[in-house]
Image (tube, helix red, strand yellow):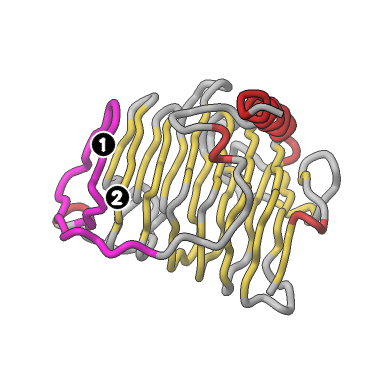
Amino acid sequence: MSRHKRSLRRRRTVAALGAALGLTVTGIVTTSMLSTAGAATPWPKPNGSSAVTATIEVSGTYDGGLKRFYGSGDLGDGGQGEGQPPIFKLKDGAVLKNVVLGSPAADGVHCMGSCTLQNVWWEDVGEDAASFKGKSASSVYTVYGGGARKASDKVFQFNGAGKLVVTKFQVSDFGKLVRSCGNCSTQYKRSIIVNDVDVTAPGKSLVGINTNYGDTAALRNVRIHGDSSRKIKPCIRYTGNDSGDEPVETGSGPDGTYCRYSSSDISYD
C-alpha cells in the first residue's frame, strides 16, 4: 500500500473515532487528541515568574512561554472562597498556551465561550483551576496537555453550556477533576469527554454530572495511579437544581446513558 493511501486510511480512522467520541477540532488537531495513550509528560520548569495584580484578558492567542504567573494584591488571597476573580479571562475563541499558574492562583482561568487551554499547568489550584462559562450549546472547551496539583475541591468547574474535552492531562492530589455545576442559577445540558489522562491519588472523583439536565460523560484511556483500593469514583450522577441547594447524588459507575465508559477504559496501578 502506498504512503498516501496509508495516510488517508489513518485520517479516516481518526475521523471515525472522533465521531464516536464526539470530538471536534478546536484550536488543535483531532489526530493528536486521539493518539495512542502513553506516559504523562514531565512537569515543566517555569521560565521565570510574574506577579499578576489584575485579571489578564485574552482574545486570540496568548503564549506565556512557560512563565509562572501568580496572584498578588487583589488576586493574592489564596483562599477557597467563591467569586474570586481569575488570573486569566478568555474571550470566546481564545487560546491560552504554555502557562504555569503558581500559588496563589486565585480562580485560575475563566473561559467566557469556546476556548483552548494548551499545555497549561496549575502548581497549586486555588478556588478552581478553570471555569467554563459559555452560554451557547455549540461552545467547545478544549484542555489539551498540562496538569494540576493540590486541588482541595474542583479542578474544572463546568458552569456553562456545550462540550468540554480534556485530553492528555494529568492530575494529582485533588477533589474532583470535572464537575458540571450542580446548583447554578442557570442550568444547561453539558457533555464531557475525558480521554488519555493520568490520575494520581489522593482524589475523590473524576467527573460529576447532572442527569436531570441530560449531561453525559465519556471516559477513555484513564490511568489511575496509587489507588489500589479504588476509592476514586470515575463518574458520579447527581440531580442538579437552579435554586442553590446542594445537589443530590443518585448513583455512580457506568450506566450506558449518562456515564459512558466500561471497566476496560479505566486502569489501576
State whether residue 200 is above or below residue 61: below
State whether residue 57 is above or below residue 78: above
Q: Which residues are magenta?
A: 43-71
**Of 42 and 207, the residue lying toward us:** 42
Q: Residue at x 40, y 35 (%)?
A: 111
The residue to which callout 2 is attached is 99
Q: Residue at x 39, y 56 (%)?
A: 127
Observer able to see residue 143: yes
Crowd rating for badge 2 (residues with CA inside 10 Å; few <14, some 14–19, many 20+): many
Q: Residue at x 56, y 32 (%)?
A: 30
Residue 46 position, x and y percent, is 24, 61
**Which secondary structure lies at badge 2?**
strand
Residue 26 position, x and y percent, is 48, 28
Screen quadrant of the N terminus? top right
Answer left or right for 264 relative to 174. Answer: right
Q: Magenta span has 44?
A: yes
State whether residue 232 is above or below residue 142: below
Q: Magenta span has 165?
A: no
